[in-house]
Image: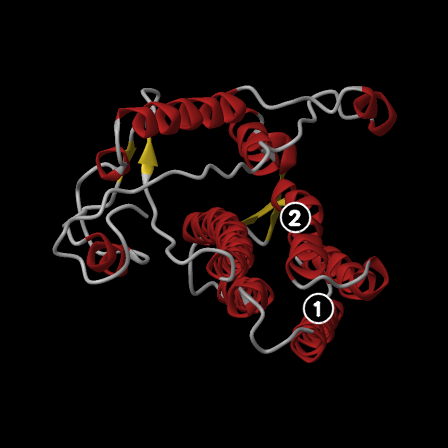
Amino acid sequence: FVLTVFQTIMTVSESTWLHTLDGRPVQTLRFAEWLITVPLLLVLSGCCALRRSLRDVATPVIVTEVYIVLSWVALLVDGLVLRWALIASTFILYGCASAGMLGWVVDFLKSSPSDAPCRGLRISSSIMLVVLFAMYGVIYLLAIFNIIDAHLEQSSYAVFGFGCKVVMSMIFTAIRVIENQHELNGLLFKISGVSTAFMSLLRGNFDFVVPCIADSNGICQLPTIGEGDTRELERCLGRPILGASLNECLAGVLEKRRFATYVQNALRHVANPQPFGGMTGQLGCGQGALPPIAQVLHVKLERMPSALLGDEML
């Protein structure tokens, strides 16, 4: 936004912000834009990307502001000695500011774990700014020695400035996406651990644990591939059950009706969870709800005569 505003001002009233020295234009507004956008980029890189404190970031920011002003003044003074003294001071201060920025990188690498996500992306933001400002310095010297004309100089500044801000936006977008993915992976790992513990608890209380899909009609459809203890249950019942419904394995119409009613009731509890009631006001969670209560239903399964174990009914 700031870059767009300054470019618009320069386009509408360029003569107001343009100075001429030795026949070469000096774009004063360009330096004014740098005094605003460069500190913002440094704060984003130091505080947001590398998680440094404002106290750590303040020194390189102030030094950068100073050498931007000195580089502008060097283009306006007449004395050759004074001009080159200012130019030399500019590059010395650039070296000091760059050393401070690289110090952010070193401190970040020391404080962050080696397996932390986005380490490379985070440090690339500071390294990119160091390289960018070095390119600005090269363009600045080429213009001082009249190796490039004023149009190419300003075009180079504009291209590098716009490209830097686009790349910085892409870096922070990538950091956000990768960190969100890392958090989701961690959550999935925790859920997987809970599921494993739950399955261990089920296996400690039941002989067979088989997944199924329930519908509103009270039908529990068994998987079409071998999951859980489907193979063991098939051997026990003496019949194939893959792709069939659990209702078909029940013994008699009464058992099937009881089981269908049980499934429908369980689905109704999931669709309409029981509210906390009086606890919601105390906890301040108006949308709170209790999870559905686990239920156990004892039913008889029909076993084919070819099965090897037990009686005809389980």
Sort mark 1 into few (<14), some (14-19) or many (20+) by Cα contacts within 10 Å.
Answer: many
Quadrant containing the N terminus in the rendered view: top right
How far apart in space, not on screen, are marks 2 and 1 (Cα)? 13 Å
Image side of residue 261 versus residue 243, left or right: right
Which residue is pictured at 24% across the width and 39% down the height?
249
Which residue, given by chain and number where applicable, does mark 2 sit on? 31
Precedes in sequence: disc 2 or disc 1: 2
Can you give x and y, in whole percent of width and height, for residue 133 in the image? 58, 64
Residue 167 visible in the displayed image: yes
Image side of residue 205 versus residue 126, left or right: left
Most foreground residue, 233 or 112: 233
Can you give x and y, in whole percent of width and height, for residue 98 in the image? 67, 72
Can you give x and y, in whole percent of width and height, for residue 29 in the image? 64, 40
Give the residue type at disc 2: Phe
**Residue placed farthest to the front in the image?**
311
Which residue is pictured at 70% across the width and 44% down the height?
36
Image side of residue 61 versus residue 310, left or right: right
Sort mark 2 into few (<14), some (14-19) or many (20+) by Cα contacts within 10 Å.
Answer: some
Q: Secondary structure at mark 1?
A: helix
Query: Is 65 situated above or below 12?
Result: below
Which residue is pictured at 58% across the width and 69% down the height?
116
Q: Secondary structure at mark 2?
A: helix
Which residue, given by chain and number where applicable, does mark 1 sit on? 90
Give the residue type at disc 1: Thr
Q: Are marks 2 and 1 in contact (CB under 8 Å)?
A: no
Can you give x and y, in whole percent of width and height, for residue 77 in the image? 73, 57
Quarter of image, res 95: bottom right
